[in-house]
């Protein structure tokens, strides 16, 4: 049996799930999952079609060094971004990167995605931030790693909790979304695209609409997260 | 055979129907159905995936007390909203709540959905109202019950007949839709989303377009509803 | 074998085709086909689901009198509109009525659909006209017949050839589309929806864009229609 | 075994791929592929439905003379456009023409498609140009050949490298997209439609948004193309 079989299978399945959910065309997307105890993450191979991808094709890397520990293929070119996010954001167990149609439009417009309703608040406890543009020397340098760093920089600047605001829009690029595990990260990526679409349509109906109040946002986020959560079934 | 088997099966099927119709992503939606003679309603369990959901997973509650009378799972967190609507609106036999993409955009924009054409008038005898925002103390209190109450309040304020205007947009949230039975409620939810999409596009082509006249609206609603209806087959 | 079996089968299949093409939700659409030699038309029954509809469910009526000559069901409530169009427009052998999403938006905005590109010109030799609104007394009267009459009136007013401009947008309602036979009518209905969507998006990118020139429009329409057509295979 | 069996099969499959990718309704699209060594191109027959099309239905023509060398059917009416592009653009091995919904909207608006993000830059090293309108005498003359010529003219005017900018929007018409082989051409056509949709939505969120910087655009194009490419697997 191959090493890290369960993690690789979760990651393989999650990469297929983002295609089924309509978040991906061609090969514009990748999902990774971390096993913090084992100190590794598993990620999609670069530029490989989703259909027919085996669990063994998933590449496993050391979370600290980035060295490949299992798998023959080259990992996703966005691997350094994932590594930075796992390093900076405790408790994150899965990361999804897509160029999903509506979230990418907000990223390209360099606008944060405001919290305009309860669908948003069920998953993100406030606006989803947009990063600054990378500078020329950053783009010419260690570009993918620095893409992760500008996300971390923005979360530090705004003093955001990554698990309460589990997504960022990279300017001129697209969304990175995460969660406590791979399945939650995929769910958040699906939710982000849905609320990005709704928010655009809301803007068309009422330009510069105000975000929902803190009370409603907190109530909905709290229904699903934290000690007072009452959504879903008992564990 | 399980209690309320037929009602639960109808409700199970209706919850799947709103997914097939594209009104739902993830678990953002729920359908209930009432058996007025038995004094109960049946509703989707909270946070449970639609696919593979059995009729026994559907929870049955007393319409008056809200007590669970059949089913092991926790009912939808929106259950109190459904109970208020059944209590206030005579003749309602099914209720659908979704965050469907276009209806939610109107709700988030806090705009009533105007009647711009015959597709709308075939199902809703005028604009679909939008509620006021809930106040902070309402959100902190019995939130889901009060979500139902603001719908009832708006229908009272505008003196609307709930069966002739079988939907409301909850501000910053999304649509609740109903009908004489579960199947009609689902049909109205599908129609609402279609007319919400058409109305947004109409606005883009002609901002602040006027609603259709009372005569055309009445003719179309009357083709399908009431004593002079002549649409469809003889019973 | 049932009467008019071939015509009914064509009409049944065409009613399914408009559903598959995404032009219809619920039962908002109907297709008819005429056999001019037999003096009849066949049309979808009113309010009947498309799936599982048999050819025998299709209702056959006399083109002149409108009397049912075969079929047990009530014909579509829009039947009088179809009869008027067959009566007024020589050479029409199939008619499609839908509330397709984008064409309906133009109808609700009461704007003619301008010819903005070659996709449009391949099927419609100029703007697709929008009717005037029906007057109150027309709506209270023989409404469906008069819906046909306002289409005919608009074509007369603009001196349009119905076979070169095989569609009309009924104000506040939706499109009626036709063709020399049922299959061509369905093809034109699919094309109308596609160009209605493209035209809306073009308007968003360049408000009040000018229609294409007569020369390009004529060249494309002529590639597919008339004596100099050179698109497709030799008969 | 039929002549040029492999090329025809690639072209047949590519014509089906653009339908599956949602780029085509009805028969509004065609793909060709070239075998430069054999001096031929293969293209879809005119007006033939995609479903059930056999490889033998694909028409093979001499790249220089345009004479049919294999196949019984009439080739696509757009064949002369393809021949011009193969003649002018060295290294092109596949061409896709569609009326895909969003790319066509930009073509109808006569606006070049700006490079607003990395999805665009991964495939096109800058804005996708829009041609001038054809003049009346060009439309009346050898229209399809001259459609190719205005594309070539625009690339010459802007001094663009066709393989680094593998698409053009023909004014009032739609996109032509190409690549080093048939599969790459199809991939570029899918990417073009995705970025055309994103760019429209970006414009709605931030009118007249500026294109991304040269540094980011170059970095992303270079990740996938040229000597320093590091996306995907080793050959």
Image (tube, coloured by chain):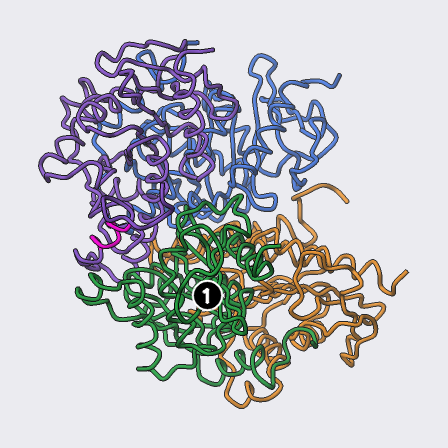
Chain colours: A green, B orange, C blue, D purple
Q: Residue at x 48, y 27 (%)?
A: C185
- Residue B175 within the magenta-colored segment of the rendering: no
Q: Residue at x 25, y 16 (%)?
A: D63
Left or right, residue D49 beside residue A223: left
Residue D97 percent location from the top left of the image: 32, 31
Using the rendered view, name the quadrant where residue A224 is placed. bottom right
Q: Nearer the viewer, residue C130 or D119?
A: D119
Chain letter for the residue marked with disc 1 in the picture: A
Left or right, residue A130 beside residue A195: left
Residue A55 percent location from the top left of the image: 55, 52
Residue A49 percent location from the top left of the image: 46, 45
Q: Residue at x 50, y 37 (%)?
A: C146
In the image, which residues are magenta?
D217-223
Q: Nearer the viewer, residue C136 or C110?
A: C110
- Residue D220 within the magenta-colored segment of the rendering: yes
Give the SS element for disc 1: strand
Residue A205 percent location from the top left of the image: 38, 64
Q: Nearer the viewer, residue D195 or C223?
A: D195
Left or right, residue A51 beside residue A29: right
Residue underneath mark 1: A95
Using the rendered view, name the quadrant where residue B106 is placed. bottom left
Q: Is residue B105 visible?
A: no
Image quadrant for the C terminus of chain D? top left
Q: Residue furthest right?
A: B1
In the rendered image, the vertical position of residue C176 relative to residue A206, given as above or below: above
How many residues crowd around disc 1 within 10 Å: few (fewer than 14), some, or many (20 or more)?
A: many
How would you classify the magenta stretch by its main secondary structure? helix
Q: Is residue D114 visible?
A: yes
In the rendered image, the vertical position of residue D82 relative to residue D124, given as above or below: above
């Amino acid at each position: 049996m191959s090493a890290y079989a369960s993690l690789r299978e979760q990651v393989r399945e999650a990469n297929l799930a983002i295609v089924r959910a309509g978040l991906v065309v061609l090969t514009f997307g990748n999902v990774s999952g971390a096993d913090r105890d084992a100190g590794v993450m598993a990620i999609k191979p670069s530029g490989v079609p989703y259909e027919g991808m085996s669990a063994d094709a998933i590449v496993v890397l050391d979370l600290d060094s980035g060295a490949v520990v299992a798998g023959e293929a080259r990992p996703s070119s966005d691997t350094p971004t994932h590594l930075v996010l796992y390093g900076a954001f405790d408790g994150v167990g899965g990361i999804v990167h897509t160029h999903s149609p509506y979230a990418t439009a907000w990223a390209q417009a360099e606008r944060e995605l405001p919290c305009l309703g309860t669908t948003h608040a069920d998953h993100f406890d406030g606006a989803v931030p947009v990063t600054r543009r990378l500078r020329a020397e950053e783009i010419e340098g260690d570009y993918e790693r620095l893409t992760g760093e500008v996300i971390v920089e923005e979360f530090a600047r705004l003093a955001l909790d990554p698990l309460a605001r589990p997504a960022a829009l990279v300017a001129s690029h697209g969304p990175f979304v995460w969660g406590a595990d791979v399945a939650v990260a995929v769910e958040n990526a699906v939710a982000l695209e849905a609320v990005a679409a709704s928010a655009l349509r809301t803007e068309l109906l009422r330009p510069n609409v105000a975000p929902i109040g803190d009370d409603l946002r907190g109530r909905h986020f709290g229904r699903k997260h934290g000690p007072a959560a009452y959504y879903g079934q008992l564990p």
